[in-house]
Amino acid sequence: MTRRIFGWDLPPGVTQRMIDEAAGHDGAPCECCGLDPAECICPECPVCHETGRPNCYSARHVTDNHGLEFNREQLMGQTRLRIEDLKQQLADAEYSLQWMEEHPEEPEEDVT
């Protein structure tokens, strides 16, 4: 069996982004405002003194929320993140479909 190390050799439907997310890739945008952590616009929590912590917001319906409310910019950033995620899911599905159309069913390799 040949070991393939390049991103274009990933199985259909698997993207490098999925691998990065599973590995805890640093540099992910803030969950509260959707911006890069270095550009985060989230206010400091008056209880825990952290920024960009989703559990501090009452809109999250969690037991340890600290009463913060998302502002308009944060809600817009969250919406942008969801849109980008949906675009990526669509691109992944289209790529997977294209790959399946170009590669008819092939017999499975013997891995023993």
Image (cartoon, rainbow, N blue to C red):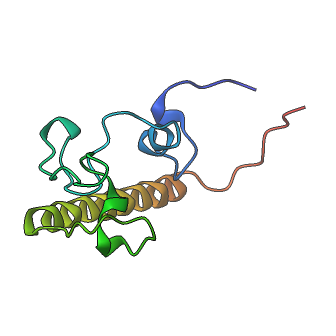
Question: Is 60 or 11 nearer to us in this picture?
Answer: 60
Q: Is residue 98 left or right of residue 44?
A: right
Q: Residue at x 79, y 39 (%)?
A: 109
From what the image shows, is residue 45 above or below residue 3? below
Please identify the residue farthest to the right as the structure is shown: 112
Dividing the picture into quadrants, the one containing residue 77 is bottom left
Picture quarter with the N terminus: top right
Residue 72, image x, y percentages? 9, 69
Residue 10, image x, y percentages? 54, 39
Residue 112, image x, y percentages? 90, 31
Q: Residue at x 53, y 34 (%)?
A: 9
From what the image shows, is residue 5 above or below residue 103? above
From what the image shows, is residue 81 above or below residue 4? below
Question: Is 104 or 83 nearer to us in this picture?
Answer: 83
Q: Is residue 16 left or right of residue 60?
A: right
Dividing the picture into quadrants, the one containing residue 39 is top left
Q: Residue at x 67, y 56 (%)?
A: 105
Q: Is residue 1 left or right of residue 100?
A: right
